[in-house]
Image: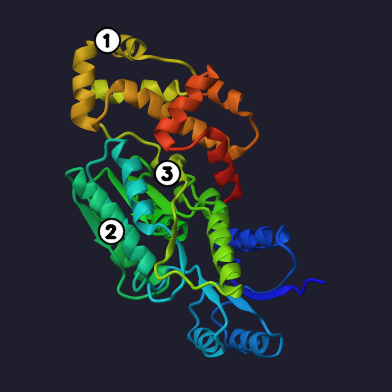
Amino acid sequence: MEQPKRIVLMAPANAGFGRDVVKGVFDYCSGRGTWDILFEGILGEAVVLQRVKAAIMDWKAQGVVGWLTNPGVVAAIRKSGIPSVNVSGISANYRPSVWGDFLAIGQMAAGHFLTRGFTSFAYLGSPDCFYSRRQGQGFSKAIAAAGHRCDVHVPRSQTPWLNQRTALQKWVLSLRKPVAILADSDYCARNLLWISQHLGLRCPEDVALMGVYNDDLECALSTPPLSSVVVSGKQVAAQAMTLLENMIGGAKPPARPVLVKPLGIASRQSSDVLAIEDRDVSAALAFIKRHAHRSVNVRDVVKHCNVSRRTLERRFVELLGRSPKDEIMRVHIERAKTLLLQGDMNIGAVGAACGLAYYPRFTRFFRRLTGMAPMEYRKQGISG
């Protein structure tokens, strides 16, 4: 009879991404032999260290996976020599690690805001956090590449939000409006939203906000609901567990961290605004967005705006770097991505609901803009 593999799983189950990682670990183990999992959901208390030590010494755990940030736990793992995989991006020093691709997260958020015509940008980070610093670098570099600058604010210490309120109020008020702000997590974005609204600023008209990790509770409980970069916790878990199982079997750990690309943007009301001063381009963008559910072409847009096609195309390229035709297809595919992640429509119906009723055309354009087929995108999204 096969002996079960015994592992310790450490994850903050009070956060959406942490819950997704936990689910991902159990999903991985459910179809791959017999596993015994000791789950520790509280990461900072001294009692956790005692339980992990007992699991290693008495229970004979064969590996540890999760948020390996507790110094005592890390020391106990190193001393025992058992395999371990970290999924926390707080520090860059632990090896091996599996992370979301933090640079790509920042770049994706920048692209979302740039397509909406913003020219003022800011990033809210967290002190002494590797993931936050890298997300900010990805965001700022993408903004700079588009010819703009990004104002970055990082609190001096990990103090409670209410203690940071005065400094954050001054920072938000100093930003040129309308401003697009990426916060390094949904939690930070929700708190910044609260602070902005108490200053009388409108979201998204004055301050457009986006978080990271698409925590369902954080995003839904915000008013307006928060947009967020979608990172699949289950994909991170699957990569981490594959690595851990191989190491338990004798494989050497990789020298570099394994990175998981973000799936896309969950676009909600907090960033659902156009920051375009050109009235014709703004009207065209609004028309295209309103008709994301039906087939439209450039002639329809030109007729609605009562402007020549050549003039509209020139202004689009000058302001957005893309043509009206490209924008129409981008909006169709963004709607398709949202419907696919809801998981309750067949692929053909999704295409029809996005103005792309001809299935081969829908799949061709979807692959061109996302790099994957619609069904592949759905599987990755639903799994995360």
Q: CA distance from mark 1 to mark 3?
A: 30 Å
Disc 3 marks a residue whose amino acid type is: Ser
The numbered mark, 1 or 3, whose residue comes first in the sequence reads 3
Which quadrant of the view contains residue 159?
Answer: bottom left
In the image, what residue occupies the spot 51% across and 31% down? Answer: 336
Which quadrant of the view contains residue 344?
Answer: top right
Q: Nearer the viewer, mark 2 or mark 1?
A: 2
Q: Position of residue 25 (x, y in %)?
A: 63, 63
Question: Which numbered circle lies on residue 270?
Answer: 3
Question: Which numbered circle lies on residue 306?
Answer: 1
Mark 2 and mark 1 in contact? Answer it, CB < 8 Å.
no
Q: Nearer the viewer, residue 305 or 88?
A: 88
Q: Is residue 63 above or below residue 112?
A: below
Residue 94 left/right relative to 120: right
Q: Is residue 102 above or below residue 346?
A: below
In the image, what residue occupies the spot 48% across and 72% down? Answer: 253
Disc 1 marks a residue whose amino acid type is: Asn
